């Protein structure tokens, strides 16, 4: 349970910050040109992928190659699938109401306010949440059961949220269901299959880094922060506040788990 190259990992923190910042600044420039800040949601998954790839390149010769490639591929699988899904979902739509509401509070330039309050904040969160992905690149000991369980959990999480997203997209395409609450498939087991899937992904990536005790201790803040965001922060809590007034949603909440899947009541 040892084997983290602390010096190399510390140097990687700067590379990861630069990768995350670069993605966010490019996205900001595109958003300003298009007048549409909702595309920052697409950049979320892309930024994590960029951090994983940059960290993998920077760690050449430092960590266990199998773990380096595994954590990079799994992060990219999750990040690029999410980015593509959000891009498709938002095609043809105007500004996200969340950003409209936020930018209405701008004391001066709306774009500069968005840069400070959205892009730089999300870039910092990418850097923080990706700490297990960064640390795993510098763990030199061979992969153990922790890594295997973590990889399985990541694949399960990606699959769970992908199925949930596909079910919801199909539901929304049906004109006969317009205005109704999605309460079938995975959505009958949890009100948030996508957020639960993300939860599994980030705890799984954390487990892959846990063969080094130092990495386990130093990076546990990351899945904890992501869990907070998904359940009590900008994920479940914020969405349900928006959905609360929808007809039938109170009954849906009463019979369906708020986060962890279970059979409906």
Image: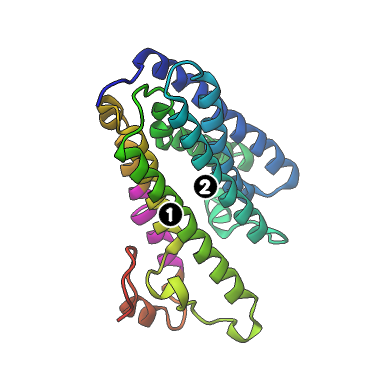
Mark 2 nearby-residue class (10 Å; few <14, some 14–19, many ≥20): many
Do we see residue 106 in this rendering? Answer: no
Q: Judging from the image, what secondary structure is the residue with disc 2 in?
A: helix
Name the residue at 41% across, 44% down.
151
Q: Indicate whether 154 appears above or below 115.
A: below
Mark 2 and mark 1 residues within 8 Å of each other at the beta carbon: yes
**Residue 101 placement (x, y as % from top left):** 54, 55
**Left or right of 209 on screen, residue 83:** right
Q: Which of 220 and 97 is in front in this view?
A: 220
The CA distance from mark 2 to mark 1 is: 9 Å
**Residue 221 placement (x, y as % from top left):** 30, 36
Do we see residue 152 in this rendering? Answer: yes
In the rendered image, which residue does mark 1 sit on?
157
Is 214 part of what is drawn in magenta? no
In the rendered image, which residue does mark 2 sit on?
78
Q: Which of marks 2 and 1 is nearer the N terminus?
A: 2
> Which residue is at the far top?
7
**Left or right of 216 on screen, residue 36:** right
Q: Judging from the image, what secondary structure is the residue with disc 1 in?
A: helix
Q: What stretch is highlighted in magenta?
A: 227-242
Mark 1 nearby-residue class (10 Å; few <14, some 14–19, many ≥20): many
> Which residue is at the far right?
33
**Residue 252 placement (x, y as % from top left):** 38, 79
Name the residue at 71% across, 40% down.
30
Name the residue at 44% across, 17% down.
62
Q: Quadrant of the C terminus?
A: bottom left
């Amino acid at each position: 349970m040892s084997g983290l190259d602390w010096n190399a990992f510390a140097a990687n923190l700067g590379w990861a910050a630069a990768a995350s910042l670069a993605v966010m600044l490019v996205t900001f420039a595109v958003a300003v040109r298009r007048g549409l800040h909702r595309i920052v949601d697409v950049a979320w998954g892309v930024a994590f992928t960029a951090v994983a790839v940059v960290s993998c390149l920077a760690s050449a010769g430092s960590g266990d190659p199998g773990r380096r490639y595994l954590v990079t591929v799994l992060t990219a699988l999750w990040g690029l699938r999410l980015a593509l899904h959000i891009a498709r979902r938002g095609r043809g739509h105007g500004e996200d109401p969340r950003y409209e509401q936020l930018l209405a509070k701008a004391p001066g330039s709306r774009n500069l306010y968005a840069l400070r309050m959205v892009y730089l904040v999300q870039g910092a969160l990418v850097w923080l949440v990706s700490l297990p992905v960064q640390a795993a690149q510098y763990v030199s000991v061979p992969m153990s059961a922790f890594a295997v369980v973590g990889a399985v959990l990541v694949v399960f999480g990606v699959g769970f949220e992908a199925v949930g997203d596909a079910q919801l997209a199909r539901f929304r395409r049906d004109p006969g269901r317009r205005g109704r609450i999605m309460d079938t498939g995975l959505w009958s087991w949890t009100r948030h299959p996508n957020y639960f899937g993300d939860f599994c992904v980030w705890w799984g990536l954390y487990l892959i880094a846990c063969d080094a005790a130092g990495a386990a201790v130093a990076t546990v803040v990351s899945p904890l922060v992501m869990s907070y965001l998904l359940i009590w922060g900008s994920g479940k809590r914020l969405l349900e506040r928006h959905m609360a007034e929808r007809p039938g949603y109170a009954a849906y909440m009463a019979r369906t788990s708020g986060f962890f899947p279970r059979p409906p009541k």
